[in-house]
């Protein structure tokens, strides 16, 4: 029997954007219904993405660092890896955070329903739950439906040895040979985890660079490290054939300008990007406009083409980042509640949590060159940082791009351990309209990695004393 | 399908209007072009069309009501259901409250406030918190002068701006108008001031208080011009165009405004710049039964006396019938007010801000003028006129030069022959 009910405010998707939207709306006095198809709240980020990968990356980083201690006179034995315990550890972390969100939802009296939501009209939803279908008439709706790993045509998807990030993070086993198709941040992060755990990892990237679109000087230190950790990295290369064998292995044909290359792998990780989950929502039943790539179109108020329907996060477009979704979710909740909010940010930071980390915000050199945006640059190599040297980090860089006229910060790029934490200073600088002097004159603690942000500015202003620069 | 007709945005500055006539009632069949309501706003009156074909189901306003932008006026059951009507979301207090699912299937589901895009663009030097506050207050950061380090816009700057605006908009000093019972001295009756009159009153008072006025008086010999006008009047009459003195004055003004651009200007909001306008749109004060209104004739410099005459006839007719569109009352660069047809020897008009000067024309008369060359008194047709100006922008010497030059131009008939 189909039940039907009415609700003032509904949020579809309980990822970082969806639950932020639901909680903010509840805090602003709305009676909120939060729908997710998973039993656990937190979406991909918490259950199958950011958080589990960070738990594993932490382990692999400590393992790698302890190996490096040999040079400093401390030698551990070979690590003894219990993959089951590791998985449990990761699951404990995820479930601890899951519970946290559920508690917050309860405290705010946000009602959570598990089920798959699909639209019936501009004001009506159907939720497929275990207990049957529920029909919901709503006043306002925020779509935070998220995204799923994209697949490659002609590559079998049902095979147990051909996996996406979701399965990879479940850490079923450690394959002997793992191929990562796609050299974006997800593939590199997971590849690095498996490499540290003992797998022979290889990467194939279709474009000429790893982390396509990222400034090449920031990718280089990471690439050098990965070259040592991985079996091979092939860029400008295409996977033309993926054939499962009887013994469970996979034969992969890789094509590049040097010719064809046929290799056998135990597992293949497909990480060629993510696609929006628009298809699950029966969005055609509404007047919500969707672009040709399947992203829902919104304006800066997060409104769709339908008055009472908002959309946020991965489902409205790139960058597909949790922190972007969170901010958009709050804007949607505030606008829907009649507050004069808008998504008005000047930079969204991107972080690759590999070792070393790569992080950037605002203008990149790649972008500046493509769009002929004038800029000037201050760059500080970590080889001149006391803290980095003391930590045994020999590669790393902090660079800041400035407006040639106002000297305000346009963009920041960092590569090195902790880059993801340090980028926040750059984002704040961009939002506040800080210029080179503002950052250079701000006292940064010594010795730290974060002082390289101040020093990069001082390289630009010419007041640096930690380097000797030829007079310009 | 029900179509709700809301009061559309009537344009800058007009937030409310008075319903002067409700043309339709429940049950009436209307077509898209039919007028359903007539409104009288601050500046003009206008007709609201039905927008769709259908039957009126509900009329939410009645004659005499004050309606605000976005307010629901009328509901129409659409007869032609194939026609899809996309409606702009609008805000009204009443509808902000609607959060429960709508009971009837209407096209506009739930309405929520739309904030005008007043916040930042990338080049504004303001932090995220300041940008958000600006959005809340509806302030355009582009026009704010930052007083923080390196001219950063601070929250204090926004507060200062608001205070300034309040001080300005407080406008008319609350006049001490004691309540007097006039009936104690005899019979009285109260006549309601029209909306146009009330608005004009507020604006005139603001202008009078804000602008340091000076009025320059002068007179022009229009004996020859009078002859030319009579000639052109005949030609015009054949085409059905009534040629008065006014288009000649306008033509002369467009010439002199090009020569003396500061008379065709406005002060910038910072009062640090003079905005000189390279277009010549003249406001013409028209007396109508419901009050004074000032329609604007565009590009006077590019039009002939006949064209101006035709346009003036059309505009004043529509002004009297309240058929002017709000746009036709905007964008003037200089105003002319003629009382020549009525009488008087001179008057001091009030400048129409943001313009900086206004010309007043009084009644021409035949005068005896002593001609030194012939040592005779000659009969001359003399037109007295005046120029009121904003002394912050225009000096007395410039104003005197302006009026003399104006008189000169009127005596050179070459300027007016098409």
Image: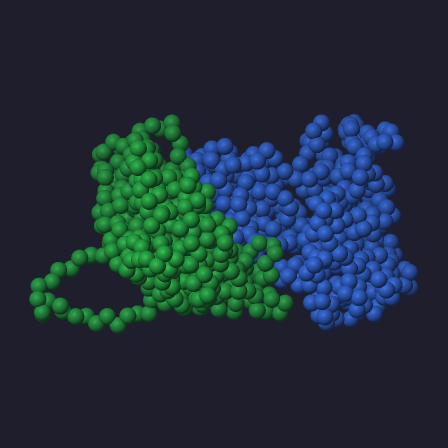
Position of residue A64 relative to residue A464, above or below, is: above
Residue A387, image x, y percentages: 82, 66
Residue at the front extreme of this rendering: B374
Q: Which of A83 and A265 is in front in this view?
A: A265
Which quadrant does the N terminus of chain B fall into? Answer: top left
Q: Which of A361 and B274 is in front in this view?
A: B274
Q: Chain A is drawn in which colour?
A: blue
Give left or right: position of B185 versus B265: left
In the picture, residue A456 is in which quadrant?
Answer: bottom right
Residue A101, image x, y percentages: 56, 54
Chain letter for green, please.
B
Residue A323, image x, y percentages: 62, 53
Give left or right: position of A211 versus B94: right
Give left or right: position of A410 versus B331: right
Q: Which residue is drawn at 38% across and 54% down?
A: B335
Q: Residue at x 50, y 65 (%)?
A: B271
Which quadrant does the C terminus of chain B fall into? Answer: top left
Q: Which of B223 and B111 is in front in this view?
A: B223
């Amino acid at each position: 029997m189909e039940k039907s009910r009415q609700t003032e405010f509904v949020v579809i998707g309980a990822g970082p954007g969806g639950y932020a939207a639901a909680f903010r709306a509840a805090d602003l006095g709305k009676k909120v219904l939060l729908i997710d198809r998973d039993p656990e709240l937190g979406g991909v980020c918490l259950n199958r993405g950011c958080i589990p990968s960070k738990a594993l990356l932490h382990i692999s980083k400590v393992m790698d660092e302890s190996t490096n201690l040999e040079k400093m006179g401390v030698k551990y034995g070979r690590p003894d890896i219990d993959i089951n315990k590791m998985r449990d550890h990761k699951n404990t972390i995820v479930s601890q955070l899951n519970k946290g969100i559920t508690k917050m939802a309860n405290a705010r009296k946000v009602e959570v329903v598990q089920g798959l939501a699909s639209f019936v009209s501009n004001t009506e939803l159907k939720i497929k739950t275990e207990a049957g279908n529920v029909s919901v008439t709503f006043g306002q709706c925020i779509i935070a439906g998220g995204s799923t790993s994209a697949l490659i045509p002609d590559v079998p998807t049902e095979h147990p040895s051909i996996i996406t990030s979701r399965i990879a993070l479940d850490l079923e086993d450690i394959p002997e040979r793992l191929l990562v198709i796609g050299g974006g941040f997800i593939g590199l992060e997971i590849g690095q985890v498996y490499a540290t755990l003992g797998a022979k990892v290889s990467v194939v990237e279709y474009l000429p660079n790893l982390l396509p679109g990222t400034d090449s000087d920031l990718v280089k230190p990471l690439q050098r490290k990965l070259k040592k950790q991985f079996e091979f990295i092939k860029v400008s290369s295409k996977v033309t054939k993926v054939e499962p064998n009887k013994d469970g292995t996979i034969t992969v044909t890789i094509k590049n300008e040097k010719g064809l290359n046929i290799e056998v792998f135990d597992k293949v990780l497909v990480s060629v990007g993510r696609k929006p989950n628009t298809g699950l929502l029966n969005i055609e039943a509404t007047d919500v406009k969707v672009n040709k790539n399947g992203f829902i179109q919104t304006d800066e108020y997060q409104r769709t083409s339908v008055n009472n329907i908002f959309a946020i996060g991965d489902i409205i477009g790139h960058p597909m980042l949790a922190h972007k979704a969170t901010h958009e979710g709050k804007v949607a909740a505030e606008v829907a509640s009649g507050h004069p909010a808008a998504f008005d940010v000047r930079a969204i930071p991107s972080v690759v949590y590999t070792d070393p980390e790569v992080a950037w915000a605002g203008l990149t050199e790649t972008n500046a060159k493509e769009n002929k945006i004038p800029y000037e640059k201050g760059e500080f190599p970590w080889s001149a940082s006391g803290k980095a040297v003391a930590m045994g980090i020999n590669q790393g860089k902090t660079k800041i791009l400035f407006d040639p006229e106002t000297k305000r910060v346009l963009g920041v790029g960092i590569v090195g351990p902790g880059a993801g934490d340090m980028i926040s200073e750059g984002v704040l600088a961009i939002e506040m309209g800080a210029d080179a002097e503002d950052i250079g004159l701000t006292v940064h603690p010594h010795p730290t990695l974060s002082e390289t942000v101040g020093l990069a500015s001082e390289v630009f202003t010419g007041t640096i004393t930690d380097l000797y620069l030829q007079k310009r | 399908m029900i179509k709700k007709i809301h009061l559309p945005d009537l344009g800058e500055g007009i937030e409310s209007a008075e319903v002067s006539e409700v043309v339709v009632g429940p049950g009436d069949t209307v077509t898209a072009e039919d007028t359903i309501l007539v409104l009288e706003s601050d500046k003009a009156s206008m007709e609201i069309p039905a927008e769709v074909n259908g039957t009126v189901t509900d009329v939410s306003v009645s004659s005499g009501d004050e309606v605000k932008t976005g307010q629901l006026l009328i509901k129409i059951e659409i007869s032609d259901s194939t026609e899809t009507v996309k409606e702009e979301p609008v805000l009204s207090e009443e509808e902000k409250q609607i959060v429960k699912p709508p009971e009837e299937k209407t096209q506009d589901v739930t309405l929520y406030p739309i904030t005008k895009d007043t916040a930042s663009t990338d080049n504004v030097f303001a932090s995220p918190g300041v940008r958000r506050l600006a959005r809340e207050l509806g302030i355009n950061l582009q026009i704010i002068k930052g007083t923080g380090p390196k001219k950063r816009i601070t929250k204090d700057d926004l507060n200062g701006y608001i205070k300034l605006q309040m001080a300005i908009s407080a406008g008319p000093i609350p006049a001490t108008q004691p309540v007097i019972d006039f009936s104690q001295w005899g019979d009285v009756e109260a006549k309601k001031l029209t909306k146009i009159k009330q608005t004009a009153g507020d604006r005139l008072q603001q202008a009078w208080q804000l602008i340091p006025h000076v009025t320059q008086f002068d007179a022009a010999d229009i004996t020859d011009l009078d002859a030319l006008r009579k000639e052109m009047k005949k030609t015009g009459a054949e085409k059905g165009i009534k040629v008065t003195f006014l288009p000649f004055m306008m033509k002369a003004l467009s010439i002199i405004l090009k020569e003396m651009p500061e008379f065709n200007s406005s002060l910038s909001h910072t009062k640090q710049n003079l905005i000189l306008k390279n277009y010549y749109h003249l406001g013409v004060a028209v007396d109508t039964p419901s009050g004074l209104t000032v329609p604007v004739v565009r590009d006077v410099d590019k039009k002939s006396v006949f064209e101006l005459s035709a346009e003036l006839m059309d505009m004043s007719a529509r002004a009297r019938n309240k058929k002017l569109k709000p746009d036709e009352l905007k964008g003037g660069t200089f105003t002319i007010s003629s009382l020549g047809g009525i009488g008087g020897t001179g008057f001091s008009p009030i400048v129409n801000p943001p313009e900086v000067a206004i010309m007043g024309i009084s009644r021409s008369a035949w005068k005896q003028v002593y001609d030194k060359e012939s040592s005779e008194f000659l009969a001359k047709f003399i037109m007295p006129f005046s120029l009121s100006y904003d002394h912050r922008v225009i000096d007395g010497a410039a104003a005197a030069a302006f009026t003399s030059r104006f008189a000169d131009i009127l005596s050179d008939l070459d300027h007016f022959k098409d």
